[in-house]
Amino acid sequence: MKIILDGKHLNIKFSSAHFIIEHEKCSKLHGHNFYVTVEIEGEIIDEKGFVIDFLHIKNMLKSICNNLDHKVLVPEKYANIVNDYVEIKTDKIYKIPREDVILLPVNNVTSEELAKFIFDKLKVYLKEYKNVKWLKVIVEEEPGQGASIEGRL
Ligand SMILES: [Zn+2]
């Protein structure tokens, strides 16, 4: 059995700034409302009648999205923390207050990398749900444009 939570309908999203390093257009700092959709496959737990409580998944997604929301998302390898600021050196230099930045273990902050980052986070949360076997995460940076990753847990 598969369950689906569609971020566009449920308002599961994070509004964040990013830039794509060395991209002709997207290397300028800009933002998106990133919507997160998940599909989870597993056996129904007989006594409960569901695969996993929707409320539990929503709480997991909210926790992940809240951490990224209203932040500047930056690949950690380009960042240097100096006092209360993060200096980011690419082909130009940004200096942003530390509290406004989330450093991510990615090569570039793309929808693909964000989908993988969220997939890996959710995988950890879902470890305790032994009946859950498969997960798909979709991140859309605008309606109809995004990336998905799926795999066994
Ligand atoms: Zn963008």
Image (cartoon, grey):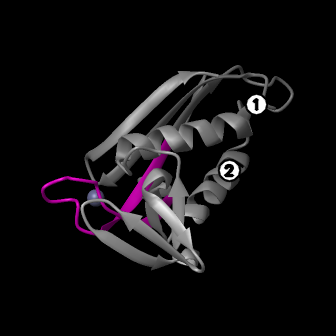
Q: Residue furthest right?
A: 47
Residue at x-position 42% and y-position 42%: 113
Q: Is residue 2 visible?
A: yes
Numbered disc 1: secondary structure: loop
- Could you say which quadrant of the image residue 17 lies in? bottom left
Residue at x-position 31% and y-position 59%: 90
State the residue position of label 2. 60
For the residues labelled 2 and 1, say whether their Cβ atoms are less than 8 Å apart: no
Does residue 128 show up magenta in the picture? no
**Which amino acid type is shown beneath numbered disc 2?**
Met
Q: Which residues are magenta?
A: 11-37
Q: Compare residues 100 and 56 and report the one nearer the observer.
A: 100
* Disc 2 from disc 1: Cα separation: 12 Å
Residue at x-position 19% and y-position 53%: 23
Q: Compare residues 103 and 32 and report the one nearer the observer.
A: 103
Q: Work out whether 139 lies above or below 52.
A: below
Q: Residues within 10 Å of mark 1 (few under 14, many from 20)?
A: few
Q: Work out whether 97 lies above or below 81.
A: below
Q: Is residue 17 visible?
A: no
* Residue 95, position as x, y percentages in the image: 41, 77
Does residue 34 show up magenta in the picture? yes
In the picture, measured across the screen, residue 61 lies left or right of residue 59, that is left
State the residue position of label 1. 127
Mark 1 residue CB less than 8 A from any atom of ligand 1:
no
Q: Answer with the quadrant where ligand 1 appears in the image.
A: bottom left
In the picture, measured across the screen, residue 81 lies left or right of residue 60, that is left
* Residue 25, position as x, y percentages in the image: 14, 59
